[in-house]
Image (cartoon, rainbow, N blue to C red):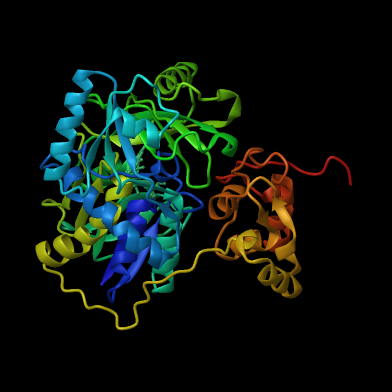
Amino acid sequence: MKVVVIGAGVVGSLILRELSRYDLELTIIEKNLDVGWGVTKANSAILHAGYDDPVGSNRAKFCAKGNEMYTQLSEELDFEIKRIGSYVVAFSDEEKKVIEELYEQGKINGVPNLEIHDRTTLLEKEPNLSKDVKCGLWAPTAGITEPWMVAIAAIENAVSNGARVVLNERVIGFEKKGTRIIKVITDKNSYETDLVINAAGLFADQIAILAEAEYVPLHPRRGEYILLDKKVGSTVRSIIFPTPTKTSKGILVLPTIDGGLLLGPTAVDLPSDMKNEFKTTVEGLTQIKSFTKQLVPSLDFSQTVKTFCGLRPESPQKDFFIGASARVENFINVMAMRSPGLTAAPAIAKYVSQEIIQDELGLKLSEKKDFNPFRKGIKKIVELPLEQWQELVKKDPAAGRLVCYCNEVTESEIVEAIRRGARTLDGVKFRTRAMFGRCQGGFCSIKIMKILERELKTDMSQIAMKSPGSWIVDGKVRE
Ligand SMILES: Cc1cc2nc3c(=O)[nH]c(=O)nc-3n(C[C@H](O)[C@H](O)[C@H](O)COP(=O)(O)OP(=O)(O)OC[C@H]3O[C@@H](n4cnc5c(N)ncnc54)[C@H](O)[C@@H]3O)c2cc1C
C-alpha cells in the first residue's frame, strides 16, 4: 500500500516514522528545502505536563500520553530532552484558585505527581522568582527539547526503515477517482497513493480544501520571543508559567536545551492571509519584557541574543482536528496543531496508525520483521573524553577544527550534517547548533559556507540561508 504524508513538521515526521514499522510504500512531501522548518521551528519547545488542556479535548487526550512517550522516543532516536519540571505561579488568592483548578484538571487528565508548593518551597527551588509570589503548581514531568531535532531524527529513522522524503515540492492538488484520491500532485511531480495524511501545519486547511475533505479554518496566532545568552541561562531552573488566562498560557521564562534563557511567547491573532508573517514587533517585545520582569525581576535584557516569532495554527475550536474524512475515503486530517502539538505528536502518530488506519479504516498493516527503532544523532565531539577526541583527530583532522566557537561545533560535525542532508546554512544550524550561539553566525557562517561549497561541490553564490533565493553572496567582488 502506498501512503503519502503531506508536511514534514514534527507531526508528519513522527507519523512517517510510526508507519515505517509496517510494510508500506511511504513518501513524505515537504515544500521547504528541509524538514521541521514550519511551525515546528519556532515555539517554546516545552514537553507540557498536560494539566491545562480542557478535560475531554483532543489536547487533553494526547498531551500527557505524548509527554510520557518522549522518554522512550528520545532514547530510540537519540535527541535530547530535559525533564526540568514546570511551575505555574500565583500572585493573588484569585490566581491561587486557578492553580487549584489546574491541579484537579491535571489529575483528571492523567498528569502524574502534580504538587502545589507554598512560597517558601517555591523560592528555595527558584530563588530568582519575584518575592511577591504566593504559591505554585509543580509539574515534574514537564520538560524541554529541540522540536526540529525531533522531526530530523524521526525522518532519518523512517528513511533508514525504507521511507522516501521529497523536499522542495509543494502539494498543489489531487487526482481523484470518485471519492478516492489516486494521485498527489505537486508543483514538480505526481505521486500515486492509496492513502493521504494531511499534516501540513498552518496550511492544512488549504490542503483539505484541495482534497474536498472536511477542515477547520486556520489562522496564525503570533508568538514572539526573546532569547537571552547562556551567561544568564541559569536564572531559572525550571519552566516558569504565570497563571494562565482563558486565552493563553501566558508569557513565560524557561531555560533552553542548550543553556540559554527563552522569554515569551505573546499571543496575537492574525488574519488567515498572514501565514507567512514572521516579523517581531516593538509592542510584542515590550510586552514580553514587562510581563517576564514581574515573574523574574532580575532578568538582564542586555544579554539578548536574538528575537524571533512563531505562528500557531489556531482554529475556532482551539483544539486539534484529527480524523479520517467522511467525504474522501482515503484522506486523514491531522490539523489545527496548536500547543501542545509538539508534546502530543508521538501519541497522535500512534493513534493515526492504530486507531484510524487499522481500526476505523480497517486497513490491516503487517509489521516489518526488520524494523529498526534506533537512530544515532551527530556526536558532539567536544563532549568526548580527551583521549577519545585525540584518537578521533588522528583519523579525521576535521574533528580537531572548531568552526562555531559559541557552541563548540567542529568541522567534522558540519560535514556529517551535510552528509545527512543539510543543503543550506539553516540545515547545518538546526542539525549541529552551529550559528545558534551568542554571535548568531557572525563569526562562523562564512566558514560554514566554505565547507558547504567544498562538500556540495558548488559555488559559494549558490549557497542559501534557508529557501531557494535566500542567497548570501551574489558573486566575487574581484578575482
Ligand atoms: C508560539 C508557539 C509556541 C508553541 N509552544 C509549544 C510548546 O511549548 N509545546 C508544545 O507541545 N507545542 C507548542 N507549540 C505547538 C507546536 O509547535 C505545534 O503543534 C507543532 O510544531 C505543529 O507541527 P506540525 O507538524 O503540525 O506543523 P509544521 O511544523 O508547520 O509542519 C507542517 C509542514 O507542512 C509543510 N507544508 C505546508 N503546506 C505544504 C504543501 N502544500 N506542500 C508540501 N508541504 C507543505 C510546511 O512547510 C511544514 O513544514 C507552539 C506553537 C507556537 C507557534
69 is higher (above) or lower (below) than 172: below
- Which image quadrant is residue 76 in? bottom left
Residue at 41% across, 71% down: 374
86 left or right of 98 in image: right
Q: How far across and how far down the image is residue 123, in percent?
A: 37, 30
353 or 150: nearer the eye?
Answer: 150
Quick check: 220 above or below 429? Answer: above
Determine the residue positioned at 48% across, 68% down.
376
Quarter of the figure with the N terminus = bottom left
Q: Nearer the viewer, residue 304 or 477?
A: 304
Which residue is at a point 71% across and 57% down the rendered structure image? 451
Which quadrant would residue 440 be assigned to in this image? top right
In the picture as drawn, the residue positioned furthest to the bottom comes out as 369
Query: Is any part of residue 192 visible from this angle?
Result: no
Query: Left of 321 or right of it: where is 3?
Result: right
At 11% from the left and 65% from the top, the residue drawn is 359
Q: Give x and y (percent) for residue 57.
A: 14, 42
Q: In the rendered view, does 462 fall on the left or right side of 220?
A: right
User: Which of these two is toward me, 300 or 33?
Assistant: 300
Percent x, y of residue 411? 70, 59
Q: Nearer the viewer, residue 128 or 319?
A: 128
Indicate which quadrant contains ligand 1: top left
Please tell me whether residue 408 is drawn above or below residue 239 in the rendered image. Answer: below
Q: Is residue 206 visible?
A: yes
Q: Picture quarter containing residue 311?
A: top left
- Where in the figure is residue 381, as x and y percent of width and height? 63, 62
Number of residue marks? 0
Compared with residue 315, is residue 460 higher up or lower down, i.e. above or below?
below
